[in-house]
Image (tube, rainbow, N blue to C red):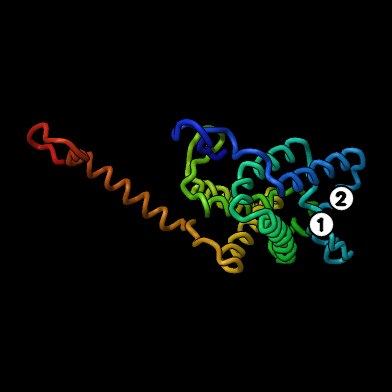
């Protein structure tokens, strides 16, 4: 989860979460909860509203690229998705406003579905399983929200697995890499293909259509930065370099 500065008190203090649920998130989370409860009482609704590429293409179920975003496979699925949406989406809505946030959310979620359908037509082993798969969940749109968050707050610390603090831009690179690698497997690639599609659609939308902030998720630049940083640290140890103060004796370089 991201680390947020406190809104009052000491500048160094921290608070949990980005604050109250914003207007757009109330509507999105409310719709997800209502449909989740509906599928508990009427299970066939999940199949009717989930995304099945073959049904969209051959049975004209054109509502599925929209409705799949509000259907979840279980309690933990919806809890973690809605928690991530609140943690990463609240500040974006404050920056963009409710209208654009909703537009971005639906463009990313629907775009992820369209890309997934197109991938299901590619005649390769990793993509064939998509054709008749039942894809549900808001993860495609949430991955887009996550990428947008990394663009606006690239150095904000996110606690990966609740333990390891890493910058938001690195977190998105990790999640995108995992989604890409997982999408190459026949067994685990269904949901991850949609996750990756959400990242791609959000990237294109923010960097072209909206003319958003410059993309800061450059994997090669990050590798070079880490390499130079490691070389500098090694040189300091080798030559016994200190960053300030007076010399403590011969052989000390300041």
Q: Would residue 125 be visible to someone looking at this image?
A: no
The residue positioned farthest toward the left in the image shown: 250
246 vs 213: above or below? above
Left or right: 125 as drawn, with respect to 33: left
- Name the one closer to the observer, 213 or 78: 213
Left or right: 12 as drawn, with respect to 84: left
Residue at 55% across, 63% down: 212
Name the residue tied to disc 1.
52
- Dot 1 or dot 2: first in sequence order is 2
Residue at 11% across, 35% down: 247
Q: Would residue 4 be visible to someone looking at this image?
A: yes
Name the residue tied to disc 2.
47
- Name the one closer to the observer, 84 or 251: 84
Q: Are marks 1 and 2 in contact (CB under 8 Å)?
A: yes
User: For the residues marked 1 and 2, what is the alpha-carbon distance in whole angstroms?
Assistant: 8 Å
Q: Give the x, y percent position of residue 40.
A: 87, 38
Residue at 91% across, 38% down: 41
- Quadrant where the C terminus is found in the figure: top left
Q: Give the x, y percent position of residue 127.
A: 70, 59
Residue at 58% across, 54% down: 148
Left or right: 142 as drawn, with respect to 54: left
Left or right: 193 as drawn, with respect to 174: right
Q: Give the x, y percent position of residue 164.
A: 49, 35
- Name the one closer to the observer, 84 or 72: 84
């Amino acid at each position: 989860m991201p680390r947020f500065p406190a809104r009052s008190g000491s500048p160094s203090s921290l608070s949990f979460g980005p604050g109250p649920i914003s207007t757009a998130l109330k509507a999105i989370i409310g719709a997800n909860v209502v449909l989740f409860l509906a599928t508990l009482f009427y299970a066939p609704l999940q199949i009717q509203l989930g995304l099945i590429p073959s049904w969209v293409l051959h049975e004209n179920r054109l509502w599925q690229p929209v409705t799949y975003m509000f259907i979840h496979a279980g309690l933990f699925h919806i809890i973690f998705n809605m928690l991530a949406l609140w943690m990463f989406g609240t500040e974006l809505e404050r920056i963009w406003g409710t209208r654009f946030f909703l537009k971005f959310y639906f463009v990313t979620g629907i775009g992820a579905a369209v890309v997934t359908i197109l991938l299901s037509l590619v005649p390769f082993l990793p993509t064939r399983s998509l054709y008749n798969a039942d894809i549900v969940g808001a993860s495609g749109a949430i991955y887009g929200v996550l990428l947008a968050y990394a663009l606006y707050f690239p150095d904000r610390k996110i606690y990966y697995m609740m333990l390891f603090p890493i910058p938001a831009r690195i977190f998105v690179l990790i999640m995108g890499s995992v989604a890409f690698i997982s999408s190459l497997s026949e067994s685990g690639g269904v949901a991850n293909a949609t996750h990756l599609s959400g990242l791609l659609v959000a990237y294109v939308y923010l960097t072209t259509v909206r003319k958003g902030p410059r993309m800061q998720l450059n994997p090669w630049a990050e590798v070079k930065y880490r390499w130079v940083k490691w070389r500098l640290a090694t040189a300091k140890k080798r030559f016994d370099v200190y960053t300030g103060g007076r010399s403590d004796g011969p052989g000390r370089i300041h």
